[in-house]
């Protein structure tokens, strides 16, 4: 497995949701938990190995260093419900106005990515610890892109501009892939915080309100200079 430079998250490393989605494809379960042990390196040949002889889990290696592990998982909290499209659009405008994005080149939510290069999600606040953003895929969508879309809104449901955090663990289920050009909506909900750990839930909805994917996450506060 090679994580292309395009799919970076924090500087010099892969976007956590995208990498988790790639690794989850090796686990025969509709719901998978991926734990990131270290920043996934870019443009590096990484090795995937089975966690057991039945491939009930998978490990991702950079040489002898464990990058991530994936196992069958379960989601126990309900997904955050959708909001009116106009509310999500207004929230996205508030997000675009921020001036201190900790990782501006992130494939999912980076403010310095060009159209067609990143997902350009703009998860802005809609109240009660919830953020929302419209998403219109500009091409065919793969499961790992849904994992990516479900990633960053969880972090933005807290305050990553003031207290930057990176994805530590993500449990996700992809129910359906959106169509190219479909008007979708992604939401993030801040559930709780314990020290440096932030617990969030995210959801992706299609144009007709159908649930396309959902996730639970643990984020870990970091010093962004570590990724400079």
Image (cartoon, helix red, strand yellow):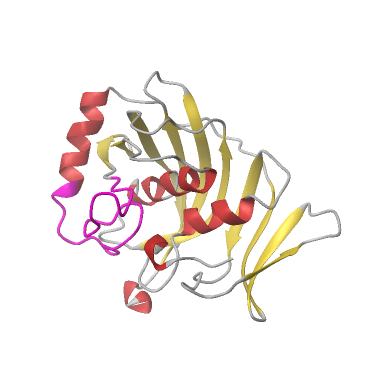
- Residue 171 locus on image (x, y percent): 58, 46
Q: Quadrant of the C terminus?
A: bottom left
Query: Of all residues shown, which one is farthest toward the right?
Result: 53
Q: Quadrant of the N terminus?
A: bottom right
Q: Is residue 9 above or below residue 208?
A: below
Please state if 138 lies on the left or on the right of 171 as rendered: left
- Residue 214 locus on image (x, y percent): 51, 36
Q: Is residue 42 above or below residue 194?
A: below
Residue beneath the point at 37% across and 36% down = 186
Q: Is residue 101 magenta?
A: yes
Q: Nearer the viewer, residue 101 or 57?
A: 57
The quadrant holding residue 179 is: top left
Q: Nearer the viewer, residue 7 or 59?
A: 7
Find the magenta span and give its range.
96-121
Please state if 24 lies on the left or on the right of 97 as rendered: right
The quadrant holding residue 77 is: top right
- Residue 43 locus on image (x, y percent): 47, 73
Residue beneath the point at 32% across and 28% down = 183
User: Which SS does the magenta portion mostly show?
Assistant: loop
Residue beneath the point at 44% across and 44% down = 150
Q: Is residue 83 above or below residue 189?
A: above
Query: Of all residues shown, which one is farthest toward the top?
Result: 208
Please state if 94 lies on the left or on the right of 227 as rendered: left
């Amino acid at each position: 497995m090679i994580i292309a430079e395009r799919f970076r998250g924090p500087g010099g490393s892969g976007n956590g949701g995208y990498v988790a989605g790639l690794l989850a494809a090796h686990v025969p379960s509709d719901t998978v938990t991926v734990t990131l042990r270290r920043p996934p390196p870019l443009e590096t040949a990484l090795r995937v190995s089975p966690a057991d002889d039945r491939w009930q889990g998978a490990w991702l290696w950079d040489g002898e260093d464990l990058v991530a592990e994936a196992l069958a998982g379960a989601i126990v909290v309900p997904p955050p419900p959708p909001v009116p499209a106009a509310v999500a659009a207004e929230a996205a405008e508030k997000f675009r106005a921020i001036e201190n994005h900790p990782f501006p080149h992130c494939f999912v939510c980076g403010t310095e990515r060009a159209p067609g290069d990143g997902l350009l999600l703009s998860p802005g606040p809609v109240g009660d610890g919830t953020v929302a953003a419209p998403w219109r895929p500009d091409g065919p969508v793969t499961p790992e892109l849904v994992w990516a879309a479900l990633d960053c809104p969880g972090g933005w449901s807290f305050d990553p501009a003031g207290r930057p955090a990176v994805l530590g663990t993500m449990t996700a289920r992809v129910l359906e892939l959106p169509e190219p050009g479909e008007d979708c909506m992604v939401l993030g909900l801040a559930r709780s915080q314990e020290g440096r750990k932030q617990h969030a839930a995210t959801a992706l909805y299609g144009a007709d309100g159908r649930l396309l994917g959902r996730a639970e996450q643990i984020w870990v506060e970091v010093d962004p200079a570590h990724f400079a």
